[in-house]
Amino acid sequence: MHSSFQIGKLMGIPIRLHITFLAIILWVALVFGTTSVPLFGSDYGFGNVQPSSVRWAYSLAFAILLFVCVGLHELGHSYIARKFGIVIRSITLYFFGGVSAMEDIPRDPRLEMQMAIAGPLVSGVLGIVCIAAYYWTAMTVGARRPISVLLWTLSIINITLMAFNLLPAFPMDGGRVLRAWFAEHMSYIKATSRAASLGRMFAVIMGILGIFSLNLLLLVVSFFIYIGASEEERITSMTVSLDGIKVRNIMSSNLHTVSPDVSLTGLTERMFTDKHRGYPVVKGGSMVGMVTVEDIKKVPVDLRPTTTVGDVMVRKIYTIGPDEDASAAMKRMGELGIRRLPVVDGGNLIGILSREDLVRAIELSHSR
Ligand SMILES: [Zn+2]
């Protein structure tokens, strides 16, 4: 969230760039500016393009176009998701691909399958379009002209992107298709854990191949697949166990609030006696902020008696309604990196939901 910035909007969806992607653009330009592999009558890579100024210009243009292609791939997923009424908050491009932030996806295998296929399909179509354009330039200006090399390299990379994403290595697109297929025959949790195990297996194989071929990119990708598979398996099992549970059922309605005029020393003492780590800050009956242990820690000990809650509280408040799903609350806390959400009903603060409440609910549902 913090290390990415918005570069524009497409189909009304904010497109964001992660800073790692900027580094990778230069790296891609460097790699493709120094490689040249003769392939079916043209070159893959710009290593043979002369003079060097033209070579680097094309190599950089290629790197930027590659990132546009990755973005279009991701937009393909989002397009289908939106057709089914899922709200896409943003698309962030990381160094290894795109990630769409979308609202809770309904656990519908058919929808998931279509969504997962859409990205590789876009890459495949882009590949074919580039091949067609390449043949046209090859016939008019020559197969080894920089523009032909650019189109040829782009077509190969798009076809590779398609094939690679279709590997049944969850959480990659192919793995999602596989999960959707499993989910038609067994429970969603079981389908996810089976797809995740396969994903991890693929990751290990890729990792071993990466080590033996000294391919750093393969090694990094295998690492991300391994972590991604485990992480999604964990989140899915948590979300499914919160099914049917509303915020109202598990929130703490025994409200402890604090006034903005209280000193931080006073608040620390309250925390000790109440055994609470965070409080909604209430002034004149309405909520004005949130204060947590972390906010106190930012102030040096000797300044705490003279600093008030109002000075350090977080004014931007995220809330949740009592009738929203507990899984939605979990998702929001995860995305915002916060540990508690005030529960507000018709403008009134009626409770607070913490991560501990969620964990307790998940544990209880497992013992059900
Ligand atoms: Zn994809």
Image: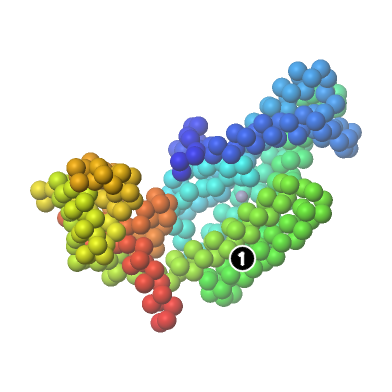
Residue at screen point 45% across, 41% down? 2
Q: Nearer the viewer, residue 21 or 161?
A: 21
328 lies above or below 50: below
Residue 253 spot, x, y in % from top left: 21, 66
Residue 71 in sight in this render: no
Residue 277 in sight in this render: yes
Q: Quadrant of residue 254?
A: bottom left
351 lies above or below 184: above
Residue at screen point 69% across, 27% down? 60
In the image, farthest residue toward the front: 302
Residue at screen point 28% across, 47% down? 301
Q: Nearer the viewer, residue 29 or 298?
A: 298
Residue 175 spot, x, y in % from top left: 64, 60
Residue marked by disc 1: 196
In this picture, residue 130 sits left or right of residue 84: right
Q: Nearer the viewer, residue 160 or 207?
A: 207
Q: Residues within 10 Å of mark 1 (few under 14, many from 20)?
A: many
Residue 251 spot, x, y in % from top left: 27, 66
In the image, farthest residue toward the bottom: 368
Q: Quadrant of residue 69?
A: top right
Mark 1, secondary structure of its residue: helix
Residue 246 spot, x, y in % from top left: 31, 67
